[in-house]
Image: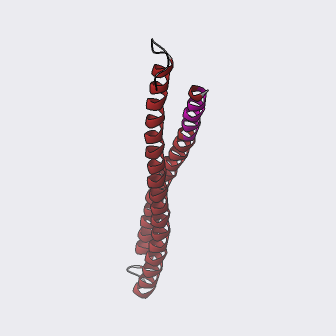
Amino acid sequence: MAISNIHETLLLYTKQKSMINDKLSENAMNLLNSSKQVAEEQAKYNDQVNNVYYQYYSSDPETYELLSESLEEDHELQLANLNSWEQELELEKNNLETQLNEINTFETTWTKLLQTNIKNDFSYGGAQQ
């Protein structure tokens, strides 16, 4: 009976590890998406700055200055939002990795206990105490 209970516990840990690994995979994809969005935001900003430069720099310096400042503020706000999201994802990743390490430690302990119980149950000369 004890051996079957330990097997059930080990299966529970396997299920938990699988769920955490799934969340870690999703987290990694979100991190990749956030990096992609940062690159896209930077490219969009560069295009907008170039357009404003070519349209207004020599013909209307005041408008160029105002538009440049506005674009830069919007760009910094977008980057701040994306950086905040990346930090949340990194924190979640660290928490999930910590949980996974704890489960691995528990699983190792229960595996050793299972091996000890099996050895004791099947040792020659009867059950040992």
Q: Is residue 9 magenta?
A: yes
The total of numbered circles placed on residues is 0
Taking the spot 53% from the left edge, 39% from the top edge, the residue there is 17
In the image shown, does 97 or 106 lie closer to the viewer? 106
Q: Is residue 92 visible?
A: yes
In the image shown, does 88 or 95 lie closer to the viewer? 95
Taking the spot 42% from the left edge, 71% from the top edge, the residue there is 49
User: On the picture, is 61 further left or further right than 19?
Assistant: left
- Image coordinates for residue 113, horizontal then vertical, percent: 46, 31
Note whether 120 is above or below 43 in the view shown: above
Q: Is residue 2 magenta?
A: no
In the image shown, does 80 or 26 lie closer to the viewer? 26
- Work out which quarter of the rendered image holds the N terminus and state it: top right
Q: Furthest-left residue in view?
A: 58
- Image coordinates for residue 67, horizontal then vertical, percent: 47, 80
Quadrant of residue 119 within the rendered picture: top left
- Image coordinates for residue 85, horizontal then vertical, percent: 50, 63
Q: Main secondary structure of the magenta part?
A: helix
- Image coordinates for residue 72, horizontal then vertical, percent: 43, 76
Note whether 24 is above or below 71 in the view shown: above
Q: Is residue 41 visible?
A: no
Give the residues drawn in magenta, as a range. 4-16
In the image shown, does 3 or 77 lie closer to the viewer? 3
Note whether 44 is above or below 64 in the view shown: above
